[in-house]
Image (cartoon, rainbow, N blue to C red):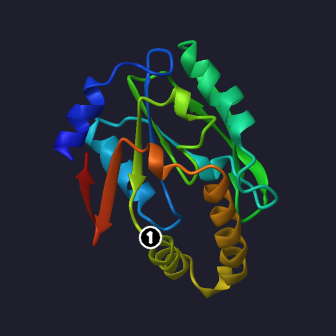
């Protein structure tokens, strides 16, 4: 993690004064774990989770609210304020405040999408095959969310066919047994 931390710190700003680092990959690939570890290695860099923007009705329709509520304020060096989606209640019920920071991590499926790449200083792809990642995710979430996962897998597959992230990644990260190994 030390090598990745130093690489991130050496990046030029990409979103106003911030270095915006995208962490993308299939659902269940280990993005949240990597984001949490990298955040800690960077002394508590804030993490924006795309799950806070996605909804049951629109898994990938979050580009505009993310841009308006987070990216534009950060690019202007201002505090960002955004609503968060509660997956159990099926509604936006919370809010977060994000102060400008030297590094901001953007974590979630689609973090490397075409519309976001101009804002990113670095894109990390968790290089776990979709079937392996989805199996992990289903195991994590339990059998009660089987129908959700069926819909999610179809939507995620369609998203990456239309707007792939992996070919644009600066770093391919392998996630095995809680370890992350980078391929630069």
Picture coordinates of residue 152, whole percent (x, y): 68, 69
Figure check: 88 above or below 75: below
- Mark 1, residue position: 129
Instruction: Give 96 or 179, whichever is nearer the viewer.
Output: 179
Question: Could you say which is closer to the camera, residue 159 or residue 38?
Answer: 159
Name the spot of residue 51 as percent of width and height, x first: 62, 53
Say above or below: 178 vs 99: below
Q: Look at the numbered disc 1 and give the secondary structure of its residue.
A: loop
Q: Residue at x 38, y 58 (%)?
A: 33
Name the residue: 60% across, 48% down: 50
Residue drawn 50% across and 15% down? 16
Q: Is 159 displayed left or right of 4 in the figure?
A: right
Q: Position of residue 100 (x, y in %)?
A: 48, 21
Locate the C terminus and report the quarter of the image it occupies: top left
Q: Quadrant of residue 18?
A: top left
Q: How many marks?
A: 1
Estimate how packed mark 1 is, as few (under 14), some (14 to 19) or many (20 or more) residues with alpha carbons within 10 Å.
few
Residue 116 placement: quadrant: top right
Asked whether 165 or 174 is in front, the reply is 165
Quarter-wise, where is residue 132 in the image?
bottom left
User: What residue sits 46% from the left and 48% below the top?
Assistant: 167
């Amino acid at each position: 993690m030390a090598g990745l931390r130093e690489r991130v710190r050496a990046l030029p700003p990409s979103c106003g004064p911030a270095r915006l680092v995208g962490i993308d990959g299939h659902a269940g690939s280990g993005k949240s774990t990597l984001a949490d570890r990298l955040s800690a290695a960077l002394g508590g860099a804030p993490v924006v989770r795309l799950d806070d923007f996605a909804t049951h009705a629109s898994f990938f329709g979050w580009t505009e609210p993310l841009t308006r509520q987070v990216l534009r304020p950060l690019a202007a060096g201002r505090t960002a304020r955004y609503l968060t989606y509660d997956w159990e209640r099926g509604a936006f019920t919370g809010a977060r405040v994000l102060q400008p920071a030297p590094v901001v991590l953007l974590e979630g499926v689609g973090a490397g999408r075409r519309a976001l790449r101009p804002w990113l200083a670095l894109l990390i792809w968790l290089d776990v095959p979709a079937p392996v990642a989805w199996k992990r995710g289903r195991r994590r979430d339990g059998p009660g969310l089987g129908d959700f996962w069926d819909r999610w897998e179809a939507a995620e597959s369609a998203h990456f066919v239309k707007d792939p992230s992996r070919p644009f990644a600066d770093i391919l990260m392998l996630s095995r047994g809680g370890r992350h190994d980078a391929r630069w």
